[in-house]
Image (cartoon, rainbow, N blue to C red):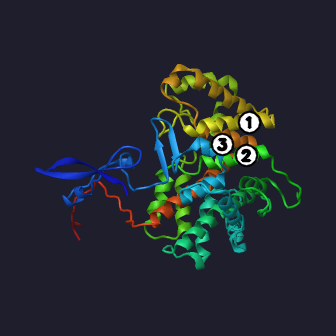
């Protein structure tokens, strides 16, 4: 539990003083406990929850002003370069990085659960072929609620653990199949001899007839880093959605489907997709300078630069830029849109207007370029984000269910009609 600082905030309310305890975490600002405001007959008002700590958590810490992102205390750049995605998953779930023996055991557990029930594959046929893959993901991940009844007692620690493993293992299969379905190709089943990232790329791009399909190790490394850099991001909209749904005792697969729904929004997980749409609108390198001048006059919006949380720089972006450079060099791609993106980056990093406003390229900018270079279509970008973030969502769900919790119940400032009667009847 957090510790009381001994300090108290004093609120003058209706001629009375209310003392509000102040708590300190291990990092970050102190938190004022406002529960007693309710006993005095008042609510607090914080649209967007910008200054509200809705829970206590030990998983992820962000300092946006300093550009810090820690998972269980470890900096994100170290995890992305010195650990792989499944090690990061283990860390988020368990609080510590795995030993060599624990890693082998955990990797094997995930591999053994990558297949989905055969009847799940039939759910895809209910969607139109031109359905957005995120629409499919909301449906098929939610449909997992109809399976695994023998391991769905959320009060049982072992059941919670196997649910987490199943989600981490099966979501890549469902994600790849959502792509295959929209392009009219047969599903490719997972292979247990491949790494997590290799297996996803294999299911995305191999065909049943291509038995010798090889995944480029540079692309697999890039994909693994993308997964790691998106694994968790504290109490964002989708994570808060999973926690809120989970606070009702809802089925965990349904809770993750709720998180996918929240992530789908263009202000959240759709940001890297918006980057590519922006590049389409710019058209060519010759138009970049003019576009950036319009950004300065606020005629257009610059996507993939700056961040709501990070006021200095996005700590994930440095690693993603290095990965982006590696992928583009390895593939030798001569894509006009990628050249356009690099010109945007050059201007943003050299123009005083963007430097003063900390409008640096963020993780969405580089991840969008990498995914395009790999050959992943734009509409799949948010699906890959959801795949990576599944471990963060289920880690927060597990944390919440490992101790006492209350059902989420935000209040409101009502500004509608006062009570009135129906007249003339």
Question: Alpha carbon of mark 2 to alpha carbon of mark 3: how far?
Answer: 10 Å
**How many numbered callouts?**
3
Specify whether 216 is left or right of 297: right
Indicate the position of residue 36 as horizontal and vertical percent values.
23, 57
Instruction: Look at discs 2 and 3 and give the one toward the viewer.
Output: 3
Question: Alpha carbon of mark 1 to alpha carbon of mark 3: how far?
Answer: 13 Å
Question: Alpha carbon of mark 2 to alpha carbon of mark 1: how far?
Answer: 10 Å
| 79 or 217, nearer to the observer | 79
Q: Label 2 belongs to which residue?
A: 221
Say which quadrant the C terminus sits in.
bottom left
Mark 2 Cα-neighbour bin, 10 Å: few <14, some 14–19, many ≥20: some
Indicate the position of residue 94 as horizontal and vertical percent values.
55, 60
Specify whether 274 is left or right of 182: left
Q: Earlier in the sequence, mark 2 or mark 1?
A: 2
Asked whether the beta carbons under mark 2 and mark 1 sit within 8 Å of each other, the answer is: yes
Indicate the position of residue 192 as horizontal and vertical percent values.
77, 63
Q: Label 1 belongs to which residue?
A: 326
Asked whether the beta carbons under mark 2 and mark 3 sit within 8 Å of each other, the answer is: no
Q: Label 3 belongs to which residue?
A: 81
| 254 or 223, nearer to the observer | 223
């Amino acid at each position: 539990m957090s510790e009381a600082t001994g300090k108290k905030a004093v609120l003058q309310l209706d001629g009375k003083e209310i003392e509000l305890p102040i708590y300190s975490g291990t990092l970050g600002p102190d938190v004022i406990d406002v529960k007693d405001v309710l006993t005095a007959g008042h609510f607090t008002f914080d649209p967007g929850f910008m200054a509200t700590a809705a829970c206590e958590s030990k998983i992820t810490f962000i300092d946006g002003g300093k550009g810090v992102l820690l998972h269980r205390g470890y900096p994100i750049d170290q995890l992305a370069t010195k650990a792989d995605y499944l090690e990061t998953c283990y860390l988020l779930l368990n609080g510590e990085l795995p030993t060599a023996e624990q890693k082998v055991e955990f990797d094997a557990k995930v591999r053994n659960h990558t297949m989905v029930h055969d009847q799940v594959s039939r759910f895809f046929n209910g969607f139109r072929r031109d359905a957005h893959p995120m629409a499919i993901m909301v449906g098929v991940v939610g449909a997992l609620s109809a399976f695994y009844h023998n391991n769905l007692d959320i009060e049982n620690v072992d059941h919670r653990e196997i649910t987490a493993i199943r989600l981490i293992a099966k979501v890549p299969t469902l994600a790849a199949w959502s792509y295959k379905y929209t392009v009219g190709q047969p599903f490719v089943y997972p292979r247990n001899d491949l790494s997590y990232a290799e297996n996803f790329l294999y299911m995305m791009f191999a065909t049943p007839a291509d038995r010798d399909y090889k995944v480029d190790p540079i692309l697999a490394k890039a994909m693994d880093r993308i997964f790691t850099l998106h694994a968790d991001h504290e109490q964002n909209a989708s994570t808060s959605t999973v926690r809120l749904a989970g606070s009702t005792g809802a089925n965990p697969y349904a809770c993750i489907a709720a998180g996918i729904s929240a992530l789908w929004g263009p202000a959240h997980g759709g940001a890297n997709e918006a980057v590519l749409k922006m590049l389409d609108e710019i058209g060519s390198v010759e138009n970049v300078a003019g576009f950036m001048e319009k950004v300065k006059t606020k005629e257009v919006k610059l996507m993939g630069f700056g961040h709501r949380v990070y006021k200095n720089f996005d700590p994930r972006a440095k690693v993603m830029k290095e990965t982006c450079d590696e992928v583009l060099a390895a593939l030798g791609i001569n894509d006009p849109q990628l050249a356009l993106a690099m010109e945007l980056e050059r201007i943003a990093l050299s123009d005083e207007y963007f430097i003063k406003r900390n409008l640096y390229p963020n993780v969405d900018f580089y991840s969008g370029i990498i995914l395009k270079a790999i050959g992943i279509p734009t509409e799949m970008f948010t699906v890959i984000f959801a795949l990576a973030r599944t471990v963060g969502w289920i880690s927060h769900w597990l944390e919440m269910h490992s101790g006492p919790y209350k059902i989420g119940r935000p209040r409101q400032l009502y500004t509608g009609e006062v009570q009135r009667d129906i007249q003339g009847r």
